[in-house]
């Protein structure tokens, strides 16, 4: 838990020399090297590190939070590839927050690899070239006569070889080259292979990697009572009974919350139950019935924010040979990471120490500084591995709670949430309803398309530049947002996690009305976007077409198979493209989902193992929440508070998943989120084909419980 930059440098120095390469994580790559002596260890302050020890071990500091997306494995793979080192000799350490040294220390938006891809490659290639020059100098031969292979510099004509560790100190004396040649993709050995996660063994053996594991001698524990309903505020409380219980140190209140502080988690949990609190109304206490009414009213409202408009939609609908209309709705959803919210804070006279699982460490730092009215540099943030997040840990509310409590009781404190706290007082995926309309001419061409999104604290509930925008001559996309006391926030693949299901289901409806094959209908629209675009086309037509054709080919879409119904869906999000085909069979009169095929274009795949896990995990997540997830409200209070009332997907309900990656050689794009959005649409479209019943709201189980076979 204490692998700070200084500790890292000291460990390198104690190894007896060695080579340290710093590289910039900002826009311009600036390299510098120094010998890792004790003096350097005390004073060297680079932006990030590639360290080669005399024993040949290569270590890098990984700045981005590890949330299960595999970044702690992928980063060193990229460096090791260009460095040309044996993977068995590569180690990585988690870096703390350092805004002066690192850029974008964030786990969100599927952007870690795209941001760091070129920087990491250049770091490895620069070190490799310096090592080659050191070897050439030792042998007194031209560097052009040397090559590298698995941690060795080799003189090609004599076959002499020196390990990187043997050359490390000499390489540190060489000026870093201004420019380096990166490997050709065809020469990759590590990138694109299957490599297990660097933390796998520690996770399997229960090592204390996660925030929930963190412990500091002398720290206190705290649980917080928050308002039981959205729209209530604290009026008064009586803590006398709680304070008299064993192990309780104090009970404090702040910002409509009451915190119990004590010596163990169990003691503060029991004492919290003894609190006597009176709440009073502060805002509307909304129920699910209210939200359904609000949706209807706003869908019919004459006022909306126009997000995109092309052509004349009104005239196109007047002249249409056929009009298709549908509405789709999704509920609120909690994030439900396996590891509930927790964080450690120690507010001291000279600064603040923060330790825990956060997707946005810099936001934790700046918000803490703002809260306490101190300079941000007086707040340190140490990152632990996270047991899931799905966007929940992009927020800082749980971090600031720990800061507030520590500041009030003047002691180091770890705040821990229960599952019920997490599900009832957290931040949710917004509930949204969409209204679609499409106009067809006599030939079955879509001549007009309109979409209105109404969300509850969703902001813009549309993605107005996504397909089929640009492919339809007359288009109108607008949105309306209802402000509610219920807190919402980013949830894996924000907005598109449901919008994709709605859009792709509706496009299937339109294709059916046009009498056209669902896949061919999408391909025809893409061709229109290419040959006669209606306004700007903000997606890559060729990349989308490729995944459509790959998914269709791998699933046998155009081959009729008796008793098998296929549903199609394709989506672009986080700069990547994913097409899916769901395979459904009918058993005992009910549809059974038995397989999902996925074609994925995320550019170069760094690690086959991590990439497949991301795709399969996204599909399972998308399927589970489309089928079962539902959070409802009664007068501001969530009706579901734990997994006994909130339905999650079960292991035996997961279908076979077949993943195929497009090998186009472009730089990596996002992968943590793009596989989730298309899933609901492919399943719903397959169920429609098998049963003739269209699922338009989530969760599917509650919409058509009688429909579902063993997937229910």
Image (tube, grey):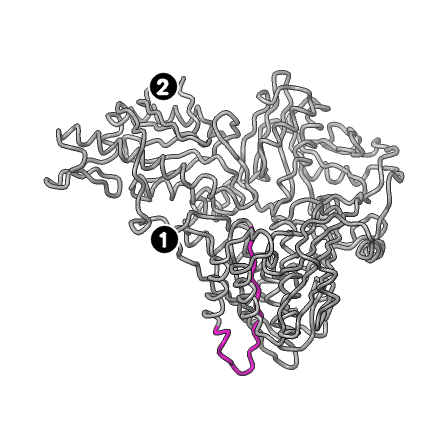
Picture coordinates of residue 87, whole percent (x, y): 33, 44
Which of the 4 image quarters holds residue 651? bottom right
Q: For label 2, count other residues whose C-alpha is less than 10 Å away and answer few (under 14), some (14-19) or many (20+).
A: some
Residue 184 lies in the magenta stretch: no
Q: Quadrant of residue 705?
A: bottom right
Farthest residue, direction bottom: 562
At numbered mark 2, what does the secondary structure look like: helix, strand or loop?
Answer: helix
Across and down, in percent, residue 423 comes to 71, 48
Q: Residue at x 58, y 33 (%)?
A: 361
- The residue that mark 1 highlights is 193
- Please indicate whether residue 580 sits to the left or right of residue 311 in the image: left
- The residue at 59%/62% (across/down) is 679
Residue beneath the point at 45% across and 69% down: 554
Magenta residues (range): 556-573
Residue bearing mark 2: 40
- Seen at 80% across and 53% down, the residue is 633
């Amino acid at each position: 838990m204490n692998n700070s930059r200084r500790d890292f440098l000291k460990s390198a120095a104690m190894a007896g020399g060695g080579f340290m390469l710093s590289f910039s994580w900002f826009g311009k790559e600036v390299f510098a090297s120094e010998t890792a002596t004790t003096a350097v260890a005390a004073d060297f302050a680079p932006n990030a590190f590639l360290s080669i020890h005399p024993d040949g071990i290569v270590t890098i500091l990984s700045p981005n939070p590890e949330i299960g997306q595999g970044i702690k494995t992928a980063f060193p793979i990229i460096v090791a590839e260009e460095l040309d080192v044996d993977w068995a000799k590569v180690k990585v350490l988690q870096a703390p927050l350092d805004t002066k040294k690192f850029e974008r220390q964030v786990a969100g938006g599927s952007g870690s690899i795209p941001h760091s891809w070129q920087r990491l490659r250049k770091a490895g290639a620069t070190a490799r070239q310096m090592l080659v020059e050191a070897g050439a100098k030792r042998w007194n031969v031209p560097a052009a006569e040397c090559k590298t292979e698995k941690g060795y510099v080799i003189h090609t004509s004599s076959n002499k070889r020196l390990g990187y560790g043997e050359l490390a100190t000499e390489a540190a004396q060489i000026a870093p080259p201004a420019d380096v040649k990166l490997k050709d993709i065809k020469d990759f050995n590590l990138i694109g292979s299957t490599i297990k996660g660097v933390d796998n063994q520690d996770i399997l053996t229960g090592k204390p990697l996660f925030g929930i594991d963190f412990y500091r001698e002398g720290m206190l524990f705290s649980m917080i009572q928050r308002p039981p309903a959205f729209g209530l505020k604290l009026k008064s409380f009586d803590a006398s009974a709680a304070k008299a219980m064993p192990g309780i140190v104090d009970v404090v209140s702040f910002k409509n919350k009451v915190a119990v502080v004590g010596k163990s988690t169990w003691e503060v949990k029991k004492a919290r139950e003894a609190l006597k609190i009176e709440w009073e109304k502060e805002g509307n206490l909304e129920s699910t019935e209210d939200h359904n009414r609000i949706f209807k009213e706003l869908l019919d409202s004459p006022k909306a924010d126009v997000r995109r408009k092309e052509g004349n939609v009104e005239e196109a609908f007047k002249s249409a040979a056929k009009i298709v209309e549908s509405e789709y709705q999704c509920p609120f959803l909690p994030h439900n990471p396996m590891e509930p919210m927790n964080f450690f804070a120690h507010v001291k006279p000279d600064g603040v120490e923060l330790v825990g699982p956060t997707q946005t460490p810099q936001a934790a730092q700046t918000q803490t500084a703002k809260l306490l009215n101190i300079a941000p540099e007086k707040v340190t943030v140490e990152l632990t591995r996270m047991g899931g997040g799905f966007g929940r840990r992009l927020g800082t509310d749980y971090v600031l709670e720990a800061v507030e409590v520590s500041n009030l009781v003047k002691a180091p404190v770890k705040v821990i949430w229960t599952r019920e706290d997490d599900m009832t007082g957290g931040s949710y995926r917004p509930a949204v309803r969409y209204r679609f309309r499409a106009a067809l001419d006599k030939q079955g061409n879509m001549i007009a398309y309109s979409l209105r999104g109404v969300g509850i604290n969703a902001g813009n509930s549309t993605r107005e530049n996504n397909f089929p925008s640009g492919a339809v001559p007359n288009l109108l996309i607008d949105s309306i947002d209802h402000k509610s006391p219920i807190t919402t926030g980013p949830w894996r693949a924000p907005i598109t996690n449901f919008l994709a299901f709605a859009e792709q289901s509706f496009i299937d409806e339109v294709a059916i009305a046009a009498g056209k094959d669902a896949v061919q209908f999408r391909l025809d629209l893409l061709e229109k976007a290419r040959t006669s675009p209606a306004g700007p086309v903000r997606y890559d037509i060729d990349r989308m077409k490729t995944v459509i054709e790959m998914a269709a080919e791998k699933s046998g879409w155009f081959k009729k198979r008796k008793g098998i119904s296929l549903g199609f869906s394709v989506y672009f999000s986080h700069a990547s493209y994913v097409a899916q085909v769901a395979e459904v069979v009918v058993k005992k009169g009910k549809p059974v989902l038995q397989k999902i095929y996925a074609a994925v274009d995320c550019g170069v795949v760094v690690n086959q193992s991590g990439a497949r896990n991301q795709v399969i995990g996204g599909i399972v997540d998308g399927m589970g929440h489309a089928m079962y997830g539902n959070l409802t409200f009664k007068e501001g209070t969530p009706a579901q508070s734990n997994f006994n009332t909130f339905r999650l997907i079960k292991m035996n309900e997961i279908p076979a998943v077949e993943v195929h990656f497009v090998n186009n050689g472009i730089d990596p794009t996002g992968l943590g989120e793009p596989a989730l959005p298309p899933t609901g649409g492919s399943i719903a479209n397959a169920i429609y084909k098998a049963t003739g019943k269209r699922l338009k709201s989530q969760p599917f189980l509650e919409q058509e419980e009688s429909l579902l076979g063993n997937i229910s």
